[in-house]
Amino acid sequence: MTQTPVRFGLIGTGRIGQVHAASIAAAPDAALSWVADPFVDGARGVVERFGGTATDSPEALIASGEIDAVLIASPTPTHVDLIEASVKAGLPVLCEKPIDLDIARVDALRPLVASSGVPVALGFNRRFDRDFAAVRARVAAGEIGELEQLIIISRDPAAPPADYVAVSGGIFRDMTIHDFDMARFFLPEIVSVSATGTQAFDPGARQHGDFDTAVTTLRTASGAVVTIVNSRHSAIGYDQRIEAFGANGMLQVANAPTSLVSASTAAAVDAKPAFGAFFLERYAQAYADELVEFVKLVRGEASTSPTFEDGRAALVLADAAQRSAVEGVAVPVEL
Amino acid sequence: MTQTPVRFGLIGTGRIGQVHAASIAAAPDAALSWVADPFVDGARGVVERFGGTATDSPEALIASGEIDAVLIASPTPTHVDLIEASVKAGLPVLCEKPIDLDIARVDALRPLVASSGVPVALGFNRRFDRDFAAVRARVAAGEIGELEQLIIISRDPAAPPADYVAVSGGIFRDMTIHDFDMARFFLPEIVSVSATGTQAFDPGARQHGDFDTAVTTLRTASGAVVTIVNSRHSAIGYDQRIEAFGANGMLQVANAPTSLVSASTAAAVDAKPAFGAFFLERYAQAYADELVEFVKLVRGEASTSPTFEDGRAALVLADAAQRSAVEGVAVPVEL
Amino acid sequence: MTQTPVRFGLIGTGRIGQVHAASIAAAPDAALSWVADPFVDGARGVVERFGGTATDSPEALIASGEIDAVLIASPTPTHVDLIEASVKAGLPVLCEKPIDLDIARVDALRPLVASSGVPVALGFNRRFDRDFAAVRARVAAGEIGELEQLIIISRDPAAPPADYVAVSGGIFRDMTIHDFDMARFFLPEIVSVSATGTQAFDPGARQHGDFDTAVTTLRTASGAVVTIVNSRHSAIGYDQRIEAFGANGMLQVANAPTSLVSASTAAAVDAKPAFGAFFLERYAQAYADELVEFVKLVRGEASTSPTFEDGRAALVLADAAQRSAVEGVAVPVEL
Amino acid sequence: MTQTPVRFGLIGTGRIGQVHAASIAAAPDAALSWVADPFVDGARGVVERFGGTATDSPEALIASGEIDAVLIASPTPTHVDLIEASVKAGLPVLCEKPIDLDIARVDALRPLVASSGVPVALGFNRRFDRDFAAVRARVAAGEIGELEQLIIISRDPAAPPADYVAVSGGIFRDMTIHDFDMARFFLPEIVSVSATGTQAFDPGARQHGDFDTAVTTLRTASGAVVTIVNSRHSAIGYDQRIEAFGANGMLQVANAPTSLVSASTAAAVDAKPAFGAFFLERYAQAYADELVEFVKLVRGEASTSPTFEDGRAALVLADAAQRSAVEGVAVPVEL
């Protein structure tokens, strides 16, 4: 039985906002109803392609009475206020990560979200990557026994501009935040964080006191250890691998190849094309599935969407990692 | 600059007709205008999803005056007549393979097609697979030197029903026909065909005097040899590989994986999921690109679409292979 | 319990003779007793390294009374006479392939070998490669169901000198002979041979009417088909692969890597070193195991050594392939 | 020109002592002259197989006047005294790792070794693994640009007995010690150590306050980071991988396969046999090359043998890792 589509209000029409607009348009049970961006031409451009009403006012969007849910894809500093306004309006929210760079603001919002009963989901899209999800399901089904080690290798193609580094909140809050959530996707009960960060190559990181290279280990009470290896650049392309090591075996997710061709010559055998560009391409399927799953959440159906609490937990881990890397101590956490 | 879309008349709304309907709907420069199927409910179903006018009469479609091109996806015995009618109406044609099972009928149509100046393209979709096309381009660019051997491994997931085998024209005309065209995609100038066919497992093949297992070698004047290995079944899934061996190296196309996950246990290391289902999934991208390329042909732009002559050549090779397998002789061909 | 070692007489001290000398020296139950080579310095060189008595006379070796078995590694034209003399002296023989280039001479020797009761083994060393043997055992154990197709890819690193081509007996008797035996290792009951040979690159082959490129298909009565793809050169190195395709799955033997290292850069991912040099390196383990197995045969223990009949069968297939390639007919065989 | 072989005195005839005895016997420029073991039957067994004089007294061996070098393969607590006695006798030493579990004893010995001019090499055999060495050479040659990250995955097949754990010195001094040296093989100038250790599965580790699972990060002054992932067990077999990540690419060493066979069925594609047993098999070639390289050192030729200082540095890193894991602080080191 077809249901009335969930009407979305989309706030923010940058790169990731446009991805969500396309996902909403493509999902069978969703419709794009309002689009807000202070840069109103951006909103108009999205509306032209996918329909809906354009506005420069997120408040107007929330108050429109024509939407069933809010998708927040605006800059990070706006997230907390927009979540608050949406929740007060009784509108379920899907908010891009991170909730905020400041855990104090997140904690201030926490009671409202908890008591409201309004669903707030966080945009940790990688949980919806079918291969990561398949590995998690196979681990949960006991295929490799107790999970003892998780290795996440996560390297971006190229370091961001120095300007961006300056306001990014640092590598742990900006980049590793996805890996923290992936760690918790497998092992939610982290109790301690230890991180090493260095400036190996990026002048921007050096200039702004950030790291370009980082290794973080997370420990659970049961003795499982997560290792996250990050680099802000990767000559080979976007490097996204996972290795789940258990008592009885191992499950690995390889990088996504860009073709099925391999070349063999006297110089080298079985050489394959470098892997794909960046997250929009690599996680295209995940973004689409994320939206579908959020629609279920709005409808009150079972949903695997990560929650506000997951968003907060990732930020707590990022803060702990930052402190650990700077102070040289393992930092205990309570999530 | 956006152009007026090419208006298509689609004849035939079975499995492959529906793929083409979707490709037409998805292509930026194409529109579905008329849909014909003697089973008119099929035509209506397609029109409901993708628009256009439904009819049970291919003749009405051709005479409608509302189409710029004809896509023939009806049963093989209807192809020759529909090509003829379309060409006489001055309408460019994209026709599913094979043109016909009877080379005499093809040859009878040949002069009309040749003299008409109307483009007739054949639906050898695999030419548009990006990996096969990339290998061909790299061979043409000289990356592996002179091409000396081409190995095509092509195995369907499961043998067709005995009823289908009875009218299929035999494995060479029905299944290997795609591989003959792929061979000619790399090495057009075949001079000799030698084939071995057996009945290794399929009762349907035995019942109707067909083969379920076949190996065909094609020779060019310059001494290059193509080896085509076919089976009507494959427990692992649709098996579609190519190995281009040249004087200086080798290019290979592997099977398309269904995920990036591999599992390692005490029993086996690096085990991956079986490869994908069948041609509609495996060649989805190729079908879409085929349509886009045909639109260029209709527009008089450069196009890599295989031609009526390519369709005829593949059938000549299939006939030669059938004779070779039955009579135990190498069969010379002129294409 | 340690037994008295089998005392070997080795005839021929070229490249392959020296391999066998080393295998005899290394085997726990074998000893090198006499070494014969008309080029007596060759015999002396072997004796210096591995012990024994050197002679220029194979007859003296056979008549010495100090050997329990003869290993014939002299040039092909000498094989038949040396087998005959050894068998008449009651000495078990391990003879390098082929028995002879002339099937008439082989057939003339056949009754003596058959009636003598003296074991005569043929040096088809690849049967002792542990990976090929493992695949055969797994096929025999039913792991992939009925074996329907066997693909053997066998390419030498570089074409031999034109002088060698002139006396080699042609690609089928000289090179494919190993692949014919490998085919029969899996599927002994071949009933028909069809071959295509071309001159794709080698002036020596052209000069002497030989082929440098060949594809052979072998058929069994049950409908299994073997495909052998040969080239006299391979820029990537010695290319030796097998694919056994059965009703329920597939077993493959990959090329032997020369290292565990792979390199990934922006240009190519996962590039590995080219595979190894040539047969002496690739099949070193197989040569050693072949000798051990032959010692069992001499001792009257169960042995998997290929027999004189296997040697004859491979030659029959080679003759049939040669005729098939030249005359363009499938050639029935009785083995 | 052949030289007089270096005459070895071997102390200790356990598992690893026997490996070295075989390496000495196999090396062209080495000879086994004396073998000492308090358990004199062990010494006699080695002498029976490889020659030499057996004794229960290491002192007698050192004083024999019939040896040119000492190979110490006795239990760890004896190493310091035996190195001291050998150096005082002017005999070059190859000593198994670790020098000692107590850095104070190592430091006490340090001045003597430094001032003596007698070569003392440490048995970090993995430096001689051809694949690891090849990667290091390619990194040094600039193939992947500046080395920024090194990942070492090192997992033993099965946890040792609890009795062994009790006296092992802990996972970092007993197992990771090899990985610390491998880290320094690539990046000698480590300045800081951070480690996380847990008890994930092994009752023996729990009983004796040791870890069975550990992740260690090492930092260099230039900002390169080494990540070492350890587990005391691995269901798949001995897991020994390296990934060198540089500014321009990546070099990886895969696990050593036990065969070239892969199996594909409906259940899984390309499944390979589990990797090999344990270090004696995995590093057989490395042990042999280590001996050959040490012979060069004894001869005063250029040698790549790791030194006493390398042995001390690995122990310093192990101590730092132990402290880091227990106290939850990053530990600065000076090497």
Image (cartoon, coloured by chain):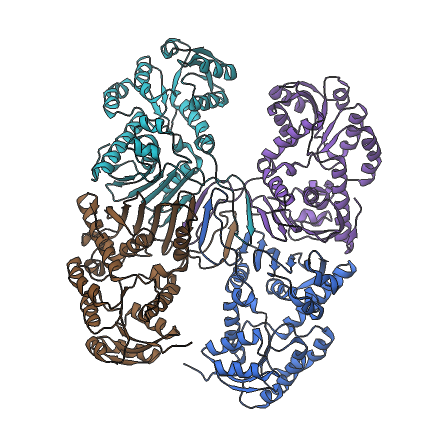
Chain colours: A purple, B cyan, C brown, D blue
Which quarter shows the N terminus of chain D?
bottom left
* Image position, residue A316 (x, y; %): 77, 44
Which quarter shows the C terminus of chain D?
bottom right
Residue at image position (37%, 56%) is: C237
* Image position, residue D307 (x, y; %): 61, 74
Task: Answer with the quarter of the image where residue B120 lies.
Answer: top left
Q: Is A101 displayed left or right of C97 in the figure?
A: right
Residue sitting nearer the eye, A314 or B303: A314
Residue sitting nearer the eye, C209 or A218: A218
* Image position, residue A167 (x, y; %): 73, 40
Marks counted in the figure total 0
Task: Answer with the quarter of the image where residue C116 lies.
Answer: bottom left
* Image position, residue B27 (x, y; %): 48, 23
Above/below status of C60 relative to B289: below
Q: Does residue D248 appear in this view?
A: no
Q: Does residue C109 appear in this view?
A: yes
Q: Is D92 displayed left or right of C129 in the figure?
A: right
Above/below status of C231 relative to C72: above
Task: Answer with the quarter of the image where residue D326 lies.
Answer: bottom right
